[in-house]
Image (cartoon, helix red, strand yellow):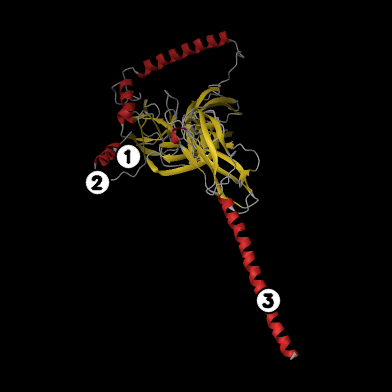
């Protein structure tokens, strides 16, 4: 009986507990639902503030001073006071319904972030703008809006003021444009160098930041195969004043070439003695458009003997250098051609001068009585004349016709002797000045020209002479026979020996003709220019 009562009591208790739990759950649900609904309503209610300024309630303008066409950035720091994460953006409006909308920025509850927008003023002078902060769900502080003014300047000028260049065989082509930027902020630009003949051929490009003022930029382009260069200056992310700017330029360039001239201006004494000092004054002129590197100055005799050598400094284009050379103890007792050479790398040029030598003393006082010498000379001359008269009278008397006469045979007349001598002589031409000389037919050796006093070699005629010049002329006129001797040509009467570079004078009117160098004995054909 007791067990049955206890079982019934337990079932009743369990039922009461279940009923109490069900009531409690229902009551709790009824209480929490209005709270959640209230929160949701509060979130969408625009009167509740979720976003406010995290610092100053004024926006910041970045990028001033501002020129027309520049992009400006406006920003402000926003704090999320709400309980949920939400999005917000910054908006800018201007005249003529122009508007710029920033990107939505999500801000966590209790956090602060910067929101910004980029905009571009449309007018020079004073520009007025309005700004505001916007959130799709509302909750923005009513102070997060306002207006501001920006003073906009004119567009900046970008110009290539001038160009210059330097082109040498050693350093290559260097182009140096001068770029100008008008007053204002620093700008990013790109400088491009093209081959103007082929504008698709970009030789070099450079990006840099340009400040207000002029700036020279150097470009080393090595040795391009071109004669004109196109330079282009391009603004990066900004707009220059296109009406007044000049962003392209063409520069014409000349490849480097070397041309130098060396001359002996003066030398003293004019007729040096053996073991006497002689000085030379010379000048070197750079007629090319490229710098001449350092080299050597040499004095070379006609027999290719180097009697002097010194170093020579580098020489800029259109520059002139003068120097002086002193030769101690002149070793030559005869007249000779002296050449002066300028040598720089593979380039060389030369000139020459005739040095006349003499062994006669040069003194102002004579060691004898001039009157005694004069009287003696007159007396000696009278004796010689009397002797010639006597000898002529004896030699020209009529001989005896007797066969047994012991007198010597009759002497030939002077006219016959002169004719015989003419038959035994021949005519030669000086290769330097073309003076005609009569020399014995059998003469073999050097001959001194009385006109230019140069020495040249003459060979004797053979027993059966051959007209070499005529035979050579016939060979030249024949197209089937090839000339094997060297040749030299020039546009004037002066030309260089093809073997030793000795300057010779051969009249251009008589070319082609066979010539012989008195210095190196080289035989060659002297031709006119272009033949």
> Mark 3 or 1, which is nearer the eye?
3
> Mark 2 or 1, which is nearer the eye?
2
| Residue 228: quarter of image | top left
Disc number placed over residue 417 in the picture, else none: none
- Residue to which mark 1 is pinned: 463
Dots 3, 1 in contact, CB < 8 A = no
Q: Residue at x 58, y 34 (%)?
A: 311
- Residue to which mark 3 is pinned: 16
Labels 2 and 1: the sequence-earlier one: 1
Q: CA distance from mark 3 to mark 1?
A: 168 Å
In the depicted structure, whether residue 102 falls above or below residue 389: below
Front-most of 81 and 289? 81
Could you classify mark 1 by the number of other residues whose Cα lies within 10 Å: few (under 14), some (14-19), or many (20 or more)?
Answer: few
Front-most of 467 and 419? 467
User: Quick check: 464 left or right of 191?
Assistant: left
Front-most of 202 and 171? 202
Residue 423: where, in percent of width, then height?
Answer: 31, 29
Q: CA distance from mark 2 to mark 3?
A: 144 Å
The secondary structure type at the circle numbered 2 is loop
User: Quick check: 233 left or right of 145?
Assistant: left
- Residue to which mark 2 is pinned: 480
Could you classify mark 3 by the number of other residues whose Cα lies within 10 Å: few (under 14), some (14-19), or many (20 or more)?
Answer: few
Residue 70: where, in percent of width, then height?
Answer: 50, 35
Which residue in the rendered view is the most extreme toward the bottom?
1
- Quadrant of the image containing the C terminus: top left
The secondary structure type at the circle numbered 1 is loop
Could you classify mark 2 by the number of other residues whose Cα lies within 10 Å: few (under 14), some (14-19), or many (20 or more)?
Answer: few
């Amino acid at each position: 009986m007791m067990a049955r009562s206890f079982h019934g009591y337990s079932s009743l208790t369990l039922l009461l507990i279940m009923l109490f739990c069900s009531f409690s759950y229902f009551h709790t649900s009824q209480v929490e639902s209005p709270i959640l609904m209230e929160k949701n309503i509060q979130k969408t209610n625009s009167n509740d503030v979720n976003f406010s300024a995290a610092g100053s309630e004024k926006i910041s303008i970045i990028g001033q001073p501002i020129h027309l066409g520049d992009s400006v950035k406006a920003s402000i720091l926003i704090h999320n006071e709400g309980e949920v994460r939400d999005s917000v953006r910054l908006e800018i409006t201007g005249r003529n319904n122009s508007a710029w909308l920033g990107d939505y920025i999500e801000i966590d509850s209790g956090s602060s972030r910067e929101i910004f927008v980029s905009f571009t003023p449309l007018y020079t002078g004073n520009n007025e703008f309005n700004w505001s902060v916007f959130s799709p769900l509302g909750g923005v502080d009513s102070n997060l809006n306002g207006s501001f003014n920006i003073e906009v300047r004119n567009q900046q000028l970008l110009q290539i003021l001038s160009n210059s260049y330097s082109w040498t065989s050693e350093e290559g082509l260097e182009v140096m444009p001068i770029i100008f930027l008008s007053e204002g902020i620093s700008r990013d630009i790109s400088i491009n160098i093209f081959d103007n003949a082929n504008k698709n051929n970009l030789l070099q490009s450079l990006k840099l930041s340009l400040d207000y003022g002029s700036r020279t930029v150097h470009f080393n382009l090595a040795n391009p195969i071109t004669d004109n260069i196109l330079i282009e200056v391009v603004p990066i992310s900004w707009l220059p004043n296109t009406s007044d700017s000049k962003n392209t330029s063409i520069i014409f360039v000349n490849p480097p070439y070397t041309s130098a001239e060396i001359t002996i201006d003066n030398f003293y004494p004019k007729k040096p003695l053996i073991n006497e000092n002689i000085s030379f004054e010379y000048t070197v002129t750079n007629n090319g458009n490229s710098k001449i590197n350092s080299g050597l100055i040499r004095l070379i005799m006609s027999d290719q003997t180097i009697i002097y050598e010194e170093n020579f400094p580098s020489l800029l284009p259109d520059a002139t250098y003068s120097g002086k050379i002193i030769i101690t103890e002149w070793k030559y007792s005869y007249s000779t051609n002296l050449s002066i050479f300028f040598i720089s790398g593979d380039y060389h040029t030369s000139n020459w001068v005739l040095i006349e030598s003499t062994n006669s003393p040069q003194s102002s006082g004579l060691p004898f009585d001039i009157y005694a010498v004069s009287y003696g000379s007159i007396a000696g001359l009278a004796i010689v004349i009397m002797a010639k008269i006597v000898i002529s009278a004896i030699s020209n008397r009529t001989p005896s016709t007797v066969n047994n006469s012991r007198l010597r045979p009759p002497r030939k007349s002077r006219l016959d002797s002169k004719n015989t001598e003419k038959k035994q002589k021949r005519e030669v031409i000086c290769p330097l000045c073309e003076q005609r000389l009569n020399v014995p037919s059998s003469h073999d050796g050097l001959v001194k020209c009385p006109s230019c006093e140069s020495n040249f070699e003459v060979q004797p005629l053979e027993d059966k002479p051959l007209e070499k010049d005529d035979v050579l002329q016939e060979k030249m006129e024949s197209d089937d026979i090839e000339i094997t001797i060297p040749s030299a040509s020039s546009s004037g009467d002066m030309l260089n020996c093809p073997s030793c570079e000795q300057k010779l004078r051969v009249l251009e009117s008589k070319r082609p003709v066979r010539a012989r160098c008195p210095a190196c004995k080289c035989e060659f054909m002297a031709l006119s220019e272009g033949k």
